[in-house]
Image: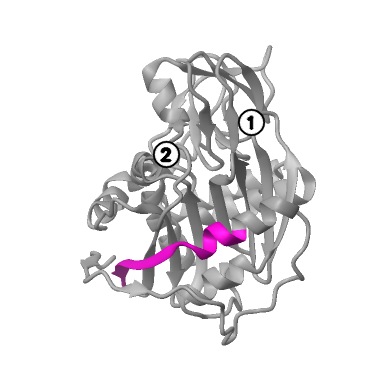
Amino acid sequence: MTTPIRRIIRTDIPVGQPSQPGVPAGPPPGGGGHVRDALRAWLGGLKLVEAARQDDALLVGLEIRDGAGRRYVLLHEAIAAGSAQVSEQGGGNVNVLTVTNKGGEPVLVLEGELVVGAKQNRTITETLLVAPGTAIPVQVGCVERGRWDQARTPFSSGRQTMEPSTRRATVKEMALHGAVDQARLWADVHGRSQDFAAQSPTGDYHSVVEKQLESSSRLFGQVPDSPARVGMMVLLDGRFVGMDVVSHPLTWSALAGRLLPSYFVGLDVMRRHPEMLGDTARARPEEWLGHVTLGQVRTAPTAGLGERVLVATGGINGAGLWHVDHPAHLALFAD
């Protein structure tokens, strides 16, 4: 049984350089140039605020002091408004879809998002920013192995994102190889379906979302909000699970209800499979954030606006998108 989150007094945790009690040393800083330095400065300016505890898990809110970036329109918002469309490429390509932005604002397509419908359900594997009036290819992974037909409606947004134990492998594969390991992803989907007895005739990950939706959404509803919040770090017994951050509180507000419930699913998965975190070090939130800011940063071009950002430091890997001097999105996970 999962213990409900208890509300706690918000206590500021000072941000500083990591004292590294057991935090593994990362690779030397390098790459990324201006983006590297700007990202480190931006992350170092965040305020950490303890948001909630759940058993051995700690949720730490990331709050911006000043210098918020742009409030982006997220893919699920644009689909709902009719200003964006996700479609198959030609007769269908398992690992590539097309996102068309018919609106007047850039649309932020986030790694980990689920899109359901068309020939089979998929998950986005790389964060992209689609300029107004453009259509770009988006790399995806299949999360519904047993279906390949057009019997369903056009793509819509899933109700939650993928859980972090699956996302972390995808982020690492995309950084190393530029593509998702589809066999590994199918195995993860099968594993999560087994964990939660959420069997589907087509091997659909969205059945896991639907099975866990009530409990995960209830836990999310017990996490107090903050008008300055732009992200969340999640620890399990002091070990780094994951961290998602965007550049504007309103972007976070639009994302949190879809993202954080998936972290509760992920925490359940990791408690069932403690080997997933292995020998990951234990440290305090401010030490983990300091550790991240000292990591190696590389940049790469994307199919849309901005630059792709890849972050690697001892025990943590991540990726995101840098746009107009701010991280439009950054996701980091235990290696």
Q: Residue at x 57, y 67 (%)?
A: 276
Which residue type carries mark 2? Ser
Q: Name the residue at 61% across, 78% down.
A: 279
Instruction: Point out the tag, 1 or 2, that comes first from the N-terminus.
Output: 2
Pointer 1 with pointer 2, Cβ within 8 A: no
Q: Quadrant of residue 307?
A: top right
Which of the image's four quarters has the C terminus?
bottom right
Left/right placement of residue 203 relative to residue 231 reads right
Using the image as rendered, state which of residue 221 and residue 308 is in the foreground: 308
Q: How crowded is mark 2: few (under 14 residues within 10 Å), some or many (20 or more)?
A: many
**Secondary structure category for the residue under label 1:** loop
In the image, taking residue 81 as reference, residue 92 lies left or right, namely right
Q: Is residue 96 left or right of residue 109?
A: right
Q: Which of 26 and 141 is in front in this view?
A: 26
Q: Residue 305, which numbered label?
A: 1
Viewer-closest of 232 and 158: 232
Numbered badge on residue 207? 2
Name the residue nearer the viewer: 72 or 284.
Answer: 72
Q: Is residue 54 part of the magenta span, yes or no?
A: yes
Q: Which residue lies furthest to the front in this view?
A: 66
Q: Give the percent coordinates (x, y) of residue 101.
A: 54, 18
